[in-house]
């Protein structure tokens, strides 16, 4: 099975779609940023006074692509070229993933499946500049996840 969105082509056009979705939903502020150092895309918006920040990892997607598309003896590209290809694919895919995820969350809110807070709880900004999820992680408010991955050997 191929990695979803690995053949996406919309790239930054999806950012325009995100903006249209959020404006149509009633968000009155919208911004986006790429942090090349961290390898993330940020989308920020405000809805009825609630500010949210959604982060998506370009590096994370690239790592997943590299796991699925290992560089082998028949690969003509150098390791650096192969890694650069992964980052290029990821930088396009992440925008499409964000667009579809945000559209799904907005649709869930509009149809009464979720509240705004329920849909974007981890992404809501606190007064200290952290998201709710960053605060939860920093304070260790959730127990560690149990790893039930089967082990061989």
Image (cartoon, grey):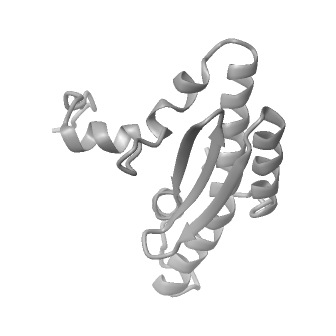
In this view, the residue in front, 61 or 52, is 52
Percent across and percent down for residue 59 are 47, 64
Q: Quadrant of residue 110?
A: top right
Report the label total. 0
Name the side, left or right, on which 128 lies relative to 37. left
State the image coordinates of residue 106 (x, y, percent, origin top left): 71, 29
Where residue 116 appears, as percent x and y from the top left, is: 60, 25
Task: Give the quadrant of residue 38.
Answer: bottom left
Which residue occupies the extreme top position in the image? 112
In this rendering, does residue 63 appear at all?
A: yes
Q: Is residue 135 above or below residue 145?
A: below
In this view, 124 is above or below 64 = above
Q: Position of residue 1 (x, y in %)?
A: 61, 44
Name, please, the residue furthest toward the left: 153
Residue 74 visible at all: no
Tell me if 45 is positioned left or right of 133 in this view: right
In the image, residue 135 sits, relative to residue 68, either above or below, namely above
**Residue at x-position 30% and y-position 41%:** 135
Report whether 120 appears left or right of 145: right
Image point (15%, 38%), residue name: 153
Residue in the foreground of this view, choosing between 21 and 26? 26
Say which residue appears at 56% left-offset and 71% top-offset.
87
Residue 147 relative to residue 116: left or right: left
**78 or 117, nearer to the observer:** 117
């Amino acid at each position: 099975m191929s990695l979803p969105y690995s053949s996406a082509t919309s790239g930054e056009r999806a950012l325009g779609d995100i903006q249209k979705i959020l404006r149509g939903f009633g968000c009155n502020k919208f911004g986006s940023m790429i942090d090349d150092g961290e390898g993330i895309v940020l989308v920020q918006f405000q809805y009825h006074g609630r500010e949210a920040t959604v982060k998506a990892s370009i590096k994370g997607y690239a790592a997943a692509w590299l796991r699925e598309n290992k560089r082998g003896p028949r690969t003509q590209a150098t390791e650096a070229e192969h890694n650069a290809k992964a980052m290029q694919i990821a930088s396009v895919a992440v925008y499409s993933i964000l667009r579809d995820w945000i559209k799904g969350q907005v649709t869930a809110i509009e149809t009464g499946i979720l509240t705004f807070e329920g849909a974007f709880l981890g992404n809501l900004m606190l007064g200290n500049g952290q998201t709710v999820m960053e605060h939860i992680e920093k304070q260790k408010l959730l127990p560690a996840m149990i790893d039930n991955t089967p082990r061989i050997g």
